[in-house]
Image: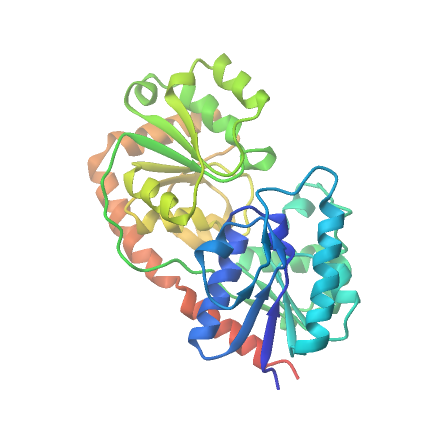
Amino acid sequence: MIKKILFDHSIFLHQKNGGISKYICELNRNLIKNKFSSTIFSPISINENLNFHNDSKINFIKLKKIPSFCTKFFYLINDVLTIFYIFFKKPSLIHLTYYNSFLAKMTSIPFILTVYDLTHEKLKLFNKKFDKKYLINNASKIICISKSTKNDLVKYYNVEENKIKVIYLGVKQNKINVRKKKIIVYVGARDGYKNFKNFINAYSRSEFLKKNYGIVCFGYEKFSIEEEKKIKHLKIEDKIQHISGDEKKLNKIYSDASLLVYPSLYEGFGLPPLEAMRCGCLVASSNIKPIREVCGDVPIFFNPKNIIDIKQKLEKILKSPILQKKKIRKGYKRIKMFNWYKCATETLKVYKSIN
């Protein structure tokens, strides 16, 4: 009988902010609402969401970032302390927050694995730091955050479907005050498959967008030297700014922004579009399967590899008040399908299915 769940430290030392750590914190909080015993154990972390969510968690030291060349050392400290915690507290099940194969191999306690996406496999960006295959083969159950992710997992790792459960992420349902400004917001990482370059290339080619809308990039990482050079080359330095902060600040930006642009080439779920919809913010997104699965026909979709198409779709949605009202109304309706309590309840059923 599963009685106590331990969420390990992995994502909280890996990610400063973002959807995965938010998912784990919300899951933990809502399991406790279900009167279930769960704890996040992350002795050392760099994560902002641990501050924002104050439910059952253990976090001794909060760093702004991991010092250079010290990543493995801090992971080892956390792993060793976690093993001691497991020895004394004896959890019934470990829910790995990321791909921590070392911890999984060091204990006989069954573990659950959430697979968020198969980006590395699809884009052939294989990461040797994680023994993902071991974790997938030895997990008692695997949670996928979308049907698209499940299909990719079966394709790349030949996992039996009865081992996998699709459980959607949630979004808070409380209303946000909407005060729209002439802002286009971009949220999260900007490198590689996130396709930020194509977005700003498209923006720079539109006189309408440059004249009427500025860009706010929200995320932990400031503009790199390469990005600053690109922005200067496109002559949009006075049109774009970077902002970082917590979830409260992000919600304010969503409520102020006219449009969220989400140009990623691949995602496992896509939480920012749902969070934007909750704030009455329009969404323009890549036309990819996971986003269509989660968001339905609420966003206006573009070909993320076609700069002209991105430009035209952004102009189309921002020039049409009738289309905007229709999309915003559909967005409010769509987010009702996704809530964290439901996510926790369905996850709890997975825990209880393990002998």
Q: Which residue is more in the foreground, 134 or 46?
A: 46
Answer with the quarter of the image where residue 115 lies.
bottom right
Residue 250 higher or lower than 185, as above or below: below
The residue shown at (58%, 33%) is: 191
Left-right relation of 272 to 6: left
Left-right relation of 144 to 178: right
Q: Which residue is more in the foreground, 353 or 231?
A: 231
Any part of residue 19 in sight:
yes
Q: Residue 260: image x %, image y %? A: 38, 38
The residue shown at (32%, 60%) is: 173
Q: Which residue is more in the foreground, 302 or 8?
A: 8
The residue shown at (42%, 65%) is: 340
Residue 280 higher or lower than 304, as above or below: below
Any part of residue 117 in sight:
no
Answer with the quarter of the image where residue 151 lies.
bottom right
Q: Residue 264: image x %, image y %? A: 52, 39
Answer with the quarter of the image where residue 194 lies.
top right
